Each structure stands twice: as structure tokens, then as C-alpha cells.
């Protein structure tokens, strides 16, 4: 037995009946009809404005009785339409929520496809960040491109400290400080040179083949980058792979190694993923914070740095080694 809600709209003849009998008269008629079926109890009857004229809730009906009632009322001509709804108690919903269901949607695979994520730092890992800064420095200060790159790397994290500023402002301020440190003459308009050239910085040649293989193996890709939304959008045109999600410094108002990028990704995608592995070249910006957060991580040590390799779950020299490293770390189940 169950509880049902019946909704009806009166026909012209039905409206005349209501005017003649009144609301209480129709209530008695409904109670009599329910009683005549041998079971059920009328809990409430309401008349209403709008498309639906009357609402009736009845408890204790069988499915057959719940069908008989609207059919009989509808056949009388009193109602132009009748709608029947099964009602459930909160306790019944609780019980239903505890049950499990195995269901395959039409056209879908008969098994669950694992949700596996690879997150990447962009600059230095996939985009040749050093080449981009060095060549821009060479354009500004002929013969000093290498020195400009070294000075820029030493100063950028310092500029990123304090109140949040967009990455284009970081690029410009670090350029000014690097030029001052090297005692180079920087024209005011040239402080934004890196902002202008960043969309043209090239990807490493090994990015395309490695990501193509990993995509074939079913991995989703995301960028977690210390960059602005518009600058990374321009950079993505150079990358030989598409990305399913992007988290920028602008999104979290912070720069790695602050953990905000990782925490936002965790709350949005990571908590439901079967596997999540972070891939990055920067030991300072990425490997240390992911170690502290216990996120599986692959260090792409392109520069042959001498930092402690034990903080990474895998260390590779270039991306051709990445599919094998991911295969070891990312087995589901």
C-alpha cells in the first residue's frame, strides 16, 4: 500500500457541480468514492487557483485502486484531466538512497571508465620557458640573453610574494629588477616585452608524442599554471594537445609553491578521481608542495638539478619517459 497525490482540472460540468455542492460536498463525495473501493483514507483535499483545480492525497491504496479512482472520476466527465503521483516519506527516500544499482546507459560501455587525471605545470615542463626568456633578453640586451635569464630566474619568486598581482605584472616587474641587477639600460616601454613574447614561446619537441600516447591510454589532462587566464589561453595554441581543465594563478590569487592550485583542483576533480598524478619540472614550485600534500608526482628534471630526488615518486629527464613512469604510478585498482 502506498500514498498517492491526485491532481485534477475541472471540466465545465465539474465546475457547475462544485458551485452546486460546495467544497465540503465534493470532499464527502471523494471520501465516499475512496471508501467504496474497500481501502484507503483521504488525508487532505485542497482547491487551488491555476491550471490545477483540486489536489487530493490518499493513503493506503493499492496500485489497482490508485488506477481505478482517476479512471472512474475521469469517466464521469467532471474532470478534464487527472494526474496521479506516488508519494514517498523521507524515511523511504533514505532507504532508497542506501540501495545500489548497476545500470548501463544506452550506447555506453558495460564497464565503468576510470577517471584518471594528469596535471601539468606548463612553463619549463611543456613550454621552453628558458628559451623564451633568454631570446627576449637577447632582443632587449644583445649579448646578455643568458645573464638576463639567470637574473630573471633568481628574482621572479621574490616578485610573486606579497599581495597578489597578475602574472603580466610579475613579468614586467621582474624584467625591471633583472635589468637593474645587471646594470642594463631598460627603456620603460620594454618592461612588458615578456608579456608580448610569451604567446610565441615554443613547446619542447617531446611534448606531443608523450601526451598523445597518454591520451590514448585514457588520461585526462589539466594545467596548473602560475599564469593569467588570457596568457595561458594564448600559450595553449602552441601546445600539441588539448586540456580538460586549467587552473591559473589568477583563479586562486596565488602563485605556486602556495598550495592553492592543487587544493582547487582537488576539490573540483581530484576527490572523485581514480588516479591523479602531477607532472612538473620545477622542484621549488611543484615537487615540494605536492610532496607535502601527498599528491603522486613525477619530476621532469630537464636541467639535471641536484635536489633530493626522494621527494618525487618518479624522476625522468624528459617526457618520452613519462608514459612508463605514469604506468607504474597510475594503475587503477
Image (spheres, rainbow, N blue to C red):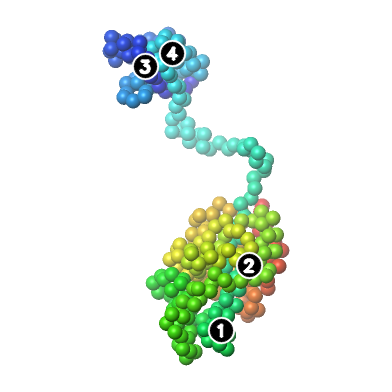
- Mark 3 surroundings within 10 Å by alpha-carbon count, few (fewer than 14), some (14 through 19), many (20 or more): many
Label 2, on which residue? Answer: 298
Marked residue nearer the N-terminal end (4 or 2): 4
Label 1, on which residue? Answer: 138
Marked residue nearer the N-terminal end (4 or 3): 3
Residue 262 sits above or below residue 9 on the image: below
Residue 10 is marked as 3
Label 4, on which residue? Answer: 74
The residue depicted at 54 percent of the width and 80 percent of the height is 136
Q: Is residue 217 left or right of residue 69?
A: right
The residue depicted at 67 percent of the width and 64 percent of the height is 208
Marked residue nearer the N-terminal end (1 or 3): 3
Residue 312 sits above or below residue 35 on the image: below
Point out the frontmost of discs 1 and 2. 1
Residue 33: which quarter of the image?
top left
**Dot 4: element:** helix
Amino acid at each position: 500500500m502506498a500514498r498517492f497525490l491526485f491532481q485534477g482540472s475541472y471540466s465545465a460540468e465539474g465546475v457547475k457541480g462544485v458551485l452546486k455542492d460546495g467544497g465540503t460536498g465534493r470532499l464527502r463525495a471523494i471520501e465516499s468514492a475512496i471508501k467504496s473501493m474497500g481501502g484507503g483514507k483521504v488525508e487532505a483535499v485542497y482547491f487551488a487557483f491555476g491550471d490545477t483545480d483540486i489536489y487530493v492525497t490518499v493513503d493506503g491504496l493499492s496500485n489497482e485502486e490508485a488506477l481505478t479512482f482517476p479512471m472512474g472520476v475521469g469517466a464521469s466527465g467532471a474532470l478534464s484531466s487527472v494526474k496521479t503521483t506516488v508519494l514517498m516519506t523521507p524515511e523511504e527516500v533514505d532507504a532508497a538512497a542506501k540501495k545500489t544499482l548497476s545500470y548501463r546507459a544506452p550506447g555506453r560501455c558495460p564497464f565503468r571508465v576510470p577517471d584518471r587525471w594528469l596535471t601539468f605545470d606548463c612553463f619549463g615542463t611543456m613550454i621552453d620557458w628558458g628559451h623564451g626568456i633568454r631570446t627576449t633578453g637577447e632582443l632587449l640586451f644583445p649579448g646578455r640573453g643568458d645573464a638576463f635569464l639567470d637574473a630573471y630566474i633568481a628574482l621572479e619568486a621574490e616578485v610573486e610574494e606579497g599581495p597578489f598581482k597578475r602574472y603580466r605584472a610579475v613579468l614586467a616587474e621582474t624584467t625591471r629588477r633583472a635589468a637593474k641587477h645587471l646594470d642594463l639600460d631598460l627603456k620603460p616601454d620594454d618592461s612588458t616585452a615578456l608579456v608580448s613574447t610569451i604567446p610565441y614561446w615554443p613547446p619542447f619537441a617531446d611534448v606531443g608524442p608523450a601526451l598523445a600516447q597518454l591520451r590514448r591510454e585514457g588520461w585526462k589532462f589539466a594545467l596548473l599554471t602560475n599564469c593569467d587566464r588570457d596568457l595561458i589561453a594564448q600559450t595553449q595554441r602552441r601546445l600539441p594537445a588539448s586540456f580538460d581543465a586549467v587552473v591559473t594563478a589568477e583563479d586562486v590569487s596565488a602563485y605556486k609553491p602556495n598550495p592553492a592550485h592543487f587544493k582547487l583542483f582537488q576539490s573540483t576533480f581530484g576527490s572523485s578521481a581514480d588516479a591523479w598524478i602531477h607532472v612538473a619540472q620545477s622542484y621549488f614550485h611543484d615537487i615540494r608542495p605536492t610532496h607535502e600534500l601527498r599528491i603522486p608526482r613525477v619530476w621532469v628534471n630537464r636541467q639535471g638539478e641536484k635536489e633530493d630526488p626522494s621527494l618525487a615518486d618518479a624522476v625522468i629527464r624528459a617526457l618520452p619517459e613519462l608514459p612508463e613512469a605514469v604506468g607504474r604510478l597510475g594503475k587503477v585498482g
